[in-house]
Amino acid sequence: MSDTRTVVVGVDASHESQQALMWARAIAGSDDRIVVVHAWEIPLLTSYDMVVAVDSVEVERMAKQGLDELVAKVDDPRIVPVTHRGHAGRGLVEEGADADLIVVGHRGNSRLSLMLGSTANYVLHHTERPVVVVRGDDPTSPPRRVVVGVDDFDDPEDSPSVRAVEWAANLPGVQEVSAVHAWFIPPLAVGMFVPTATDLSAMDEAAQGVADRVVAAAGPFPDGVTVTADVARGTGGFALIEASRDTDLVVVGRRGRGGFSGLLLGSTSVETAAHSHAPVAVIR
């Protein structure tokens, strides 16, 4: 990471966006730029026989005024206010095209809410930049302990898991990183119950080998940061959601499969972002 970073945050009048801004301020350095983006669109007044558009100049003026009031209230010299006309997710993707990080709040609590076109969903599927979806009861402290979901790889230079561990370990203020590889036996293969003769320890050892390889490929790490390779039983999404109860940030890598395929196929990234008890970072 460069010494000076740009963090783009989406804000509106919601509590979730206020938490997103607080989280971004907590993790940003003293010399970083925090670009606060507020999107606005022209509302339509409709009746049975007509459609009337509200004056766009007045709507834009009100949007800028509201954003200026928010910035003045926060009183943080690192903040750069930006208003964007159009879809909020598209505005964040455009403003964050060269950013080090995009931060967005998410008020939903299921994958269904993500599939219905939320800002978080749009940004996750359309940006090439790292994205943090701010969730949890009190997600406004800088992360110290981070859990990263990892998978095996053929080429470490092209591994989302390796990049995710590297990103997490270099996040300012982080002290502990747990690289977790989860495994499970599909019920289709073994029925409702795993036979007692099944050697689960061998599977644990294989999973441990995956986590060890990812950590080795991602190192060396900054001084003062401890990175461990760990194993969890269960699907990747389940393991990370459970781990999110006792961590400050969950990080997952994504392979760049966009559109609805990731949602319909139950991708770990989307499942974790929709149900985590802590903020979730999605890294390409």
Image: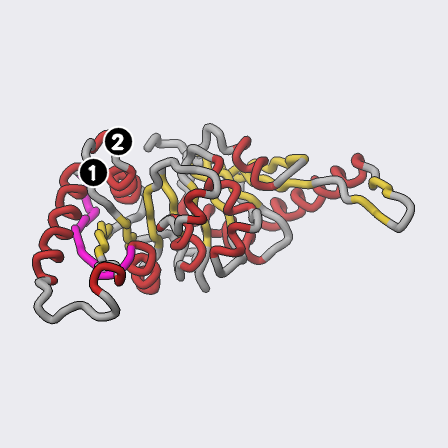
Residue located at (54% from left, 39% from top): 79
Question: In this picture, is 134 found above or below 163?
Answer: below
Quadrant placement of the N terminus: top left
For disc 1, the neighbor class at 10 Å (few under 14, some 14 to 19, many from 20) is some
- Residue 91: image x %, image y %? 58, 36
For disc 2, the neighbor class at 10 Å (few under 14, some 14 to 19, many from 20) is few
Say the numbered circle drawn on residue 153.
1
Q: Which residue is mark 2?
A: 158
Give the SS element for disc 1. Answer: loop
> Is residue 181 in sight in this rendering?
yes
Residue located at (34% from left, 52% from top): 250
Which region is colored magenta?
220-235
Q: Which badge, 2 or 1, comes first in the chain's sequence?
A: 1
Question: In this picture, is 233 found above or below 58?
Answer: below
Q: Is residue 194 magenta?
A: no
Three-letter amino acid code at the position of disc 1: Phe
| Residue 191 placement: quadrant | bottom left
Give the SS element for disc 2. Answer: helix
For residue 279, side relative to residue 9 (left or right): left
* Residue 16 or residue 217, whichever sits in front: 217
Residue located at (86% from left, 42% from top): 52
Say the numbered circle drawn on residue 170.
none
